[in-house]
Amino acid sequence: MHLAARLDQVVTQDVYRADQRATEQRIGQVEAALAGLRGEHDQITERGDQQRREDQLQAAATRRLVVSSFVAPLVLMAVQLWLVSRGTS
């Protein structure tokens, strides 16, 4: 009687193989999902880096514009003053 109960608990080889295949499939699905997440993370990181570079270029262009808008009139005024001083001497 104990032997019969014990044999009822033994997993057949076919059931074991099916369980192993299901486990391997689940592992494959998890690995595929993880690879997809890694790809998404890399894309998001690259987009963030690209945006940061574009922002830095835009900030540099703005600084150049601001500096030139103040320096150019000063240079023109200095040249005009120099020309006027040369003309009256």
Image (cartoon, rainbow, N blue to C red):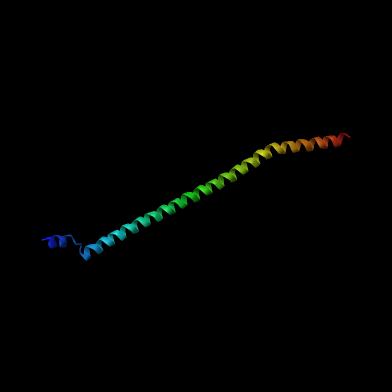
Residue 33 figure quarter = bottom left
> Eyeballing the image, is 12 above or below 41?
below
Residue 81 figure quarter = top right
> Eyeballing the image, is 20 above or below 56?
below
At which x and y percent is residue 47? 49, 49
At which x and y percent is residue 5? 14, 60
Q: Closest to the observer: 23 or 5? A: 5
The structure residue drawn at horizontal position 45% and vertical position 51%, both measured from the top left corner, is 41
At which x and y percent is residue 72? 71, 39
Quadrant in which the N terminus appears: bottom left
Question: Farthest right residue?
Answer: 89
Give the mark count. 0
* 14 to the left or right of 32: left
Question: Farthest front residue?
Answer: 2
Quadrant in which the C terminus appears: top right
The structure residue drawn at horizontal position 22% and vertical position 65%, both measured from the top left corner, is 14
Q: Closest to the observer: 79 or 51? A: 51
The structure residue drawn at horizontal position 75% and vertical position 37%, both measured from the top left corner, is 76
> Eyeballing the image, is 56 above or below 31?
above
Q: Closest to the observer: 71 or 76? A: 71
Question: Farthest bottom residue?
Answer: 13
